[in-house]
Image (cartoon, rainbow, N blue to C red):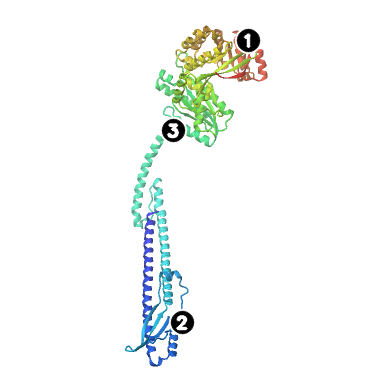
Amino acid sequence: MSLLRKLLASVTLVLTAILLGTLVFSLGSARQYLHEQLDAQARNAAASLALLLSQPANQSLVVQQLLVAAWLDTGKFHSIRVQRLQQEPPNEREPSTVPQAAWVPDWFRVLLPLPAVQAERAIGSAEAPWGHVQVVVSAAPAQAMLWDSSLKMSGWIAGAGLVWALLVTALLRWFQRVLQDEVAPQVLRIGSAGAAPRDARSRQLRELQAVTAAIQVTHRKVQQQEQLQAQRIQALQKEAHSDAGTGLPNRSYFLNALTQALQSVQCGYVLLMRQRDLQAMNASMQRQAVDHWLRGMAEQVQAVLDRSQLQHAQLARINGSDFAVLLPGKLGPSAMHLIEQLRRKLLSLNVALSAERWSRWALALTAFTGRDSAAMVLTRLDQAVMRAESAGHGSVEYADPEIAPGTAVQASEGQWRQWLTRALQQPRQLRIATRAMGSTSLVRSQKWHEATLELQDDEGQMLDACLFLPAVARLGLSADYDRKALELALEWLRQHPYTDLLLRLSMASLEQAGFEQRICALLAQPQVQPLLRHLILELDAFALEALPEQALDFCAMADKAGVQIGLRRLEQAPRVLLHLCSLRLRHVKVSGFFADLSMHNAGGAQLLGAMLQTAQSQQTAVLITDAVNPETSDWLRAKGAHLTFVQERNNSG
């Protein structure tokens, strides 16, 4: 409630109390006055009637009765009683109709009662009275007069209150109109350009002149502060939403854009690009050169996005080595074409870190829908980019939005490190799962088993290797986990003699110092020597391109120990064909997807044919790992390739 309303309400309450008090005291005074009038009327009537009855002519009983009846007919008396001194019964008369004020309510008679008044006088002389008369005056007319007076006073008070309420309402409306018409426009103009004009009527109101002057001063101060704040806001927005090194939008801006896309567009893609060797670039290059390279890279990637004519494509730098591209909308194949252009552009921007080493990118892509949240999208991208780092092939790893990772996958890096380190120390938390594999007309073995590492989480559920090995590679624990997997594989071979077991090793392990020596020491133990001819260690073919020296040394060590060696994903590293002549390999793997695509492309068919011919010249089996169509299957069989298939899946062991 406003101050004016409170003031008017208090005045109204005081006036109401005064008027009600006046009404009460007035009615009380009127009642007292009427009671006194009734008493005087009773005394006068008793004196007059006693005087009439004392006259000698009025001594007879009949005359007395006639006089009493005449007085009663006036309607002013309730009863008249004549009593003689002799022991005669009193002569008491009452009117046939007692006067009543029927319109006076009972509650009023109870609140303001007017009782009947009586008076007595002696009949006869003062020395020899012969009787007395008693007169009771009726209070009904006085009661009616009092009720009528109270109605008039109450009506007057109600009318005065109504007039006061109307005046108060008019005053409030007038005051609100004055504030709205004179003060409010001036206050609203405080934040606008130009001076706040004074209204002509405001000068007529003395109370508002000081307010108008204060508004003018405030207007000037606000304009000055607005100019300073606008400059600060522009600087803060540029700093808060932009990356200082590249000028690209930063992580907070990107997250806001992604959240808006999830709420409005509700579909699209996000591409995450991680420069894996940014730390090595900072160590081998000057800081200014690295900053210049980052700015140039951002400009060229942005130029690719601009040429694509996708209006809502957004490039951002979400941390030091991670860049993201937001592609909202139902883009379809055009998005995949753009992503391939971005991948090629990034590969063309790689810099030489040494004579044999170039910078590398890890790329991850995922689709999003309106059911996702920004955290879910970033979690999938983080997992996919870890897989890309682990593979090291430079291709785009796609994170399927339909796959919902468990709670362990969403853990932070510190939780990952604590959890994975504890798993190495607890022997029952890590184990291998195997599946029996077969192939068409494979010379050395028609049946073998593939082993994958599994990790038991805190809830007792087993996680597949693809969910935690990317984090293992990022944290530098690949060598420890591969050695643990090898120990478990040898234990499995001890329990399943005369069965070949294939174990995959990570390329990240080859990069760690001392890994080859640790594996060599493990394979040199006497108790495992009989098992080694059934052990197959499989490397990513890209390791021979990225780490040729370490990969060749490891293959030579394994061959010397009597362990069979295999390569996977040969189609992603075709230059490895140059090294096949120097390796003794059990098999190389090529994906069926690549084989199907090659059948519809002359260059691809020639490359696939060269792979098959080169491998067969070295007595190396070529395994096709995925399903292919019948036409491709017949062509592959004719070329001597073998189609693999899962015969059965075993429990973890």
- Residue that numbered label 3 is attached to: 241
Q: Amino acid at mark 3?
A: His
Displayed quadrant of residue 243 = top left
Helix, strand or loop under label 3: helix
Q: Give the camera-side residue of 69 and 521.
A: 69
Q: Give the camera-side residue of 516 and 283.
A: 516
Q: Are marks 3 and 1 in contact (CB under 8 Å)?
A: no
Upstream in the sequence, badge 1 or badge 2? 2
Helix, strand or loop under label 2: loop
Residue 603 screen position, x and y as percent? 61, 16
- Residue that numbered label 1 is attached to: 443
Circle 3 residues within 10 Å: few <14, some 14–19, many ≥20: some
Q: Relative to residue 402, is residue 110 depicted above or below?
A: below
Q: Relative to residue 261, is residue 647 depicted above or below?
A: above
Name the residue rendered at 43%, 73% in the picture. 148
- Residue that numbered label 2 is attached to: 95
